């Protein structure tokens, strides 16, 4: 591995020509294959270049940018993170809507790859070296596909938040949701894609000046947002309150509680948006964006072809 500080290499931001001096006048020169995305960063002078790292198969160039000031939110989008979508409420002074942000088929991709890995493992059971290599390859491919889809989702979500001058409220995934969950559910909820979608939302929000509020996820899916009663037993697809007559889709219900928690610590915003969950009883859930209609559907790789470039600028 070779690491070069930003003064000790030279990169032409137009052409991708990279020169790393080694000793005296000796050096390595190569062209980095630049994608549209790489170019968009490199030609934007607000991004400055940082450390360069060379590892087998990859060249990593750190780029950095001063984050803009965070906007004062006028509204809130509170979302509970689930396997197929993020669900909850968008709440602004004039209007509150039940919303869902679909995750672009991530679960399907994962299920397909899981089956493929299992088949591979049994087919190559006799040769652990081949098996290990193929499984690692499959794993990387799955990760790339999932990541690709999540980038679309996080980008759209940040756009929507910007349009509505909204803060985004999410569960703090670092706090384990032990209350009332089975071990299996907790394990699933700590899965990589949940953390990855939050990671992407957070860094894109920071770049766009969109505020992010993280709340403690304890009891969010087991509390009635109307009367505050808690259920200590299992909650099915629909949350039904035992104390009042409230009924709501479990995931949307969790999103409502996430919003309530955020408002509890922000009085000014709570007064402005005046969130009344009871009034939303019969509302339909509106998608926050439409990934397919916007032509932004995640592109499928041709099967069996690795489309990753050998060099990556991150
Ligand atoms: Zn209730």
Image (spheres, rainbow, N blue to C red):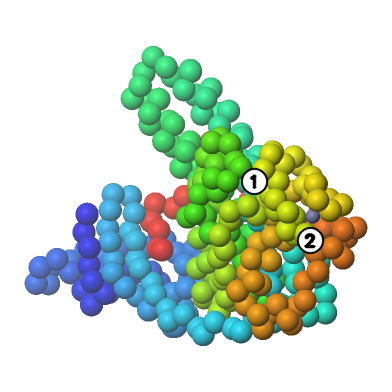
Does mark 2 have its CB less than 8 Å from ligand 1? yes
The percent coordinates of residue 152 (x first, y second) are 62, 60
Residue at (65% x, 80% y) in the render: 267
Q: Percent x, y for residue 32? A: 37, 63
Tell me the quadrant of the picture where the N terminus can be found. bottom left
Of the image marks 1 and 2, the number of the one nearer the N terminus: 1
Residue pictured at 41% horizontal, 63% vertical = 314
Q: Between residues 293 and 200, which one lies in front from this camera angle?
A: 200
The residue located at (72%, 41%) in the rendering is: 235
Disc marking residue 226: 2
Image: 182 above or below 283: above
Count neighbours of disc 1 (C-alpha within 10 A) and say few if under 14, some if 14 to 19, many if 20 or more.
Answer: some
Q: Which residue is mark 1?
A: 83
- Say which quarter of the image contains residue 49: bottom left
Residue extending farthest to the front is 243
Q: Nearer the viewer, residue 16 or 237?
A: 237
Determine crowd level at label 2: few under 14, some 14-19, many 20+ residues with C-alpha closer than 10 A.
Answer: some
Q: Which label sits on residue 308?
A: none
Mark 2 secondary-structure assignment: loop
């Amino acid at each position: 591995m070779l690491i070069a500080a930003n003064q000790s290499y030279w990169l032409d931001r137009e052409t991708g020509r990279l020169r790393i001096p080694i000793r005296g006048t000796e050096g390595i020169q190569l062209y980095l294959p630049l994608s549209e995305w790489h170019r968009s960063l490199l030609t934007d002078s607000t991004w400055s270049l940082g450390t360069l790292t060379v590892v087998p198969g990859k060249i990593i160039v750190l780029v950095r940018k001063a984050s803009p000031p965070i906007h004062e939110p006028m509204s809130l989008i509170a979302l509970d993170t689930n396997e197929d979508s993020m669900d909850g409420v968008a709440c602004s002074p004039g209007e509150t809507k039940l919303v869902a942000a679909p995750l672009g088929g991530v679960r399907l991709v994962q299920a397909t790859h899981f089956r493929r890995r299992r088949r591979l493992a049994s087919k190559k059971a006799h040769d652990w070296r081949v098996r290990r290599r193929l499984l690692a390859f499959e794993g990387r491919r799955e990760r790339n596909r999932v990541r690709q889809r999540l980038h679309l989702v996080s980008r759209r979500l940040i756009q929507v938040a910007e349009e509505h001058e909204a803060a985004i409220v999410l569960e703090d995934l670092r706090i384990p949701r032990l209350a009332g969950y089975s071990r299996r559910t907790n394990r699933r909820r700590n899965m990589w894609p949940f953390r990855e979608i939050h990671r992407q939302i957070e860094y894109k929000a920071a770049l766009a000046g969109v505020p992010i509020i993280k709340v403690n996820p304890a009891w969010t899916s087991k509390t009635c947002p109307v009367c505050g009663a808690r259920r200590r037993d299992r909650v099915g697809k629909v949350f039904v309150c035992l104390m009042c007559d409230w009924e709501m889709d479990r995931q949307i219900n969790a999103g409502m509680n996430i919003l309530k928690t955020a408002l509890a610590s922000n009085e000014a915003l709570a007064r402005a948006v005046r969130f009344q969950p009871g009034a939303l009883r019969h509302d339909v859930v509106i998608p926050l964006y439409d990934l397919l209609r916007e032509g932004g559907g995640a592109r499928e790789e041709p099967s069996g072809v690795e489309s990753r470039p050998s060099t990556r600028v991150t």
